Amino acid sequence: MPVFLILLLLGTLGYMFWRRKTTSLTRECRWRKDGRAGQWRCAYCGAVDSGEGSPTQCRRNWPAP
């Protein structure tokens, strides 16, 4: 049982580390698909991304497109 709990803890910590390294989104980032314009728009800061999939990088401090 203790070995299982240690493995579970290591797996959880590994998942949290992996998620932190693969995205720069903050808690405020809320991307919404604007179907008419074919863009993703952040509901928090108003940033726009024209990619096909949901953005994984925060665009808050980027210059306007």
Image (cartoon, grey):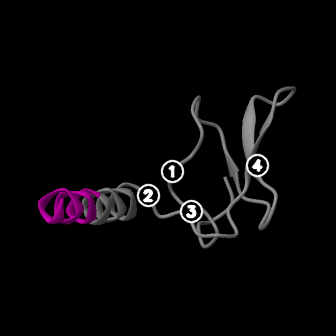
Residue drawn at point x = 26 percent, y = 58 percent: 8
What number is the disc on residue 23? 2
Secondary structure under tag 2 reads loop
Asked whether, in this view, residue 56 is left or right of residue 65, the answer is left
Badge 4 or badge 1: first in the primary sequence = 4
Q: Which residues are magenta?
A: 1-11
Q: Is residue 57 magenta?
A: no
**Dot 4 crowding, Cα within 10 Å, few <14, some 14–19, many 20+:** many
**Dot 3 crowding, Cα within 10 Å, few <14, some 14–19, many 20+:** some
Q: Amino acid at mark 3?
A: Cys
Badge 4 or badge 2: first in the primary sequence = 2
Foreground residue among 46 and 3 = 3
**Dot 2 crowding, Cα within 10 Å, few <14, some 14–19, many 20+:** few
Q: Where is residue 5 shown, x and y percent of the image?
A: 23, 63
Marks 3 & 4, CB-CB < 8 Å contact? no
Secondary structure under tag 3 reads loop
The N terminus: image quadrant: bottom left
Cα distance between the residues tagged 2 and 3: 8 Å
Secondary structure under tag 4 reads strand
Asked whether, in this view, residue 59 is left or right of residue 48, the answer is left
Cα distance between the residues tagged 2 and 1: 5 Å
Badge 3 or badge 4: first in the primary sequence = 4
Residue drawn at point x = 44 percent, y = 57 percent: 23
Asked whether, in this view, residue 50 is left or right of residue 13, the answer is right
Q: Which residue is mark 1?
A: 56
Cα distance between the residues tagged 4 and 1: 13 Å
